[in-house]
């Protein structure tokens, strides 16, 4: 299975409460290979990421049971999270990656991968 990996999302800011940063398109399978986080704040920010299954075709709700990353990102630093092949797989319409951080609009996120 050969893919051309590319940018799945533009750089966007993370909210203080969990919200979707990527939603799987209809009739597609997405393979997430890396997530880049950048903390532009002058203090550390806790970032939480969730792999949230759809809820009967609608966007589901982030919860501790679908959390896959929680870490303090140092001030003015960048973290790159890489996933082994095939990556995080999103198969259903509106399966999502959701994110939250300590302070709204201080941390940015960008997701790289492929869809088929």
Image (cartoon, rainbow, N blue to C red):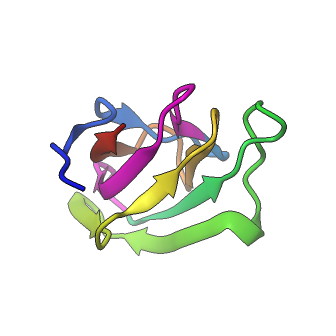
65 or 102: nearer the eye? Answer: 65
Q: How many marks?
A: 0
- x and y, in percent, of residue 11 in the image: 29, 34
Q: Is residue 79 left or right of residue 99?
A: left
Q: Furthest residue to the right?
A: 56
- x and y, in percent, of residue 44 in the image: 39, 66
Q: Is residue 5 left or right of residue 91?
A: left
Q: Is residue 15 left or right of residue 3?
A: right
Above or below, 51 against 9 in this view is below
Magenta-span inclusion, residue 42: yes
User: Image quarter for residue 111?
Assistant: top left
Q: Furthest residue to the top?
A: 26
Magenta-span inclusion, residue 105: no
Above or below, 66 against 40 in this view is below
Above or below, 86 against 114 in this view is below
54 or 102: nearer the eye? Answer: 54
Identify the residue at horizontal 37%, vertical 32% (top origin): 12
- x and y, in percent, of residue 74 in the image: 31, 69
State the extent of the magenta-drawn residues as a range: 20-43
- x and y, in percent, of residue 34 in the image: 28, 58
User: Image quarter for residue 67?
Assistant: bottom right
Identify the residue at horizontal 40%, vertical 44% (top origin): 106
90 or 7: nearer the eye? Answer: 90
Quarter placement of the N terminus? bottom left
Q: Furthest residue to the front?
A: 1
Identify the residue at horizontal 53%, vertical 35% (top origin): 24
Quarter placement of the C terminus? top left
97 or 18: nearer the eye? Answer: 97
């Amino acid at each position: 299975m050969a893919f051309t990996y590319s940018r799945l999302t533009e750089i966007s800011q993370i909210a203080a409460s969990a919200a979707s940063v990527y939603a799987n398109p209809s009739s597609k399978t997405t393979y997430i290979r890396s997530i880049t986080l950048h903390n532009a704040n002058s203090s550390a920010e806790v970032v939480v990421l969730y792999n949230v299954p759809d809820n009967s075709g609608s966007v589901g709700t982030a919860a501790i049971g679908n959390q896959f990353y929680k870490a303090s990102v140092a001030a003015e630093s960048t973290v790159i999270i890489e996933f082994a092949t095939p990556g995080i797989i999103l198969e259903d319409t509106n399966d999502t990656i959701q994110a939250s951080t300590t302070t709204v609009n201080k941390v940015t996120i960008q997701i790289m991968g492929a869809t088929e």
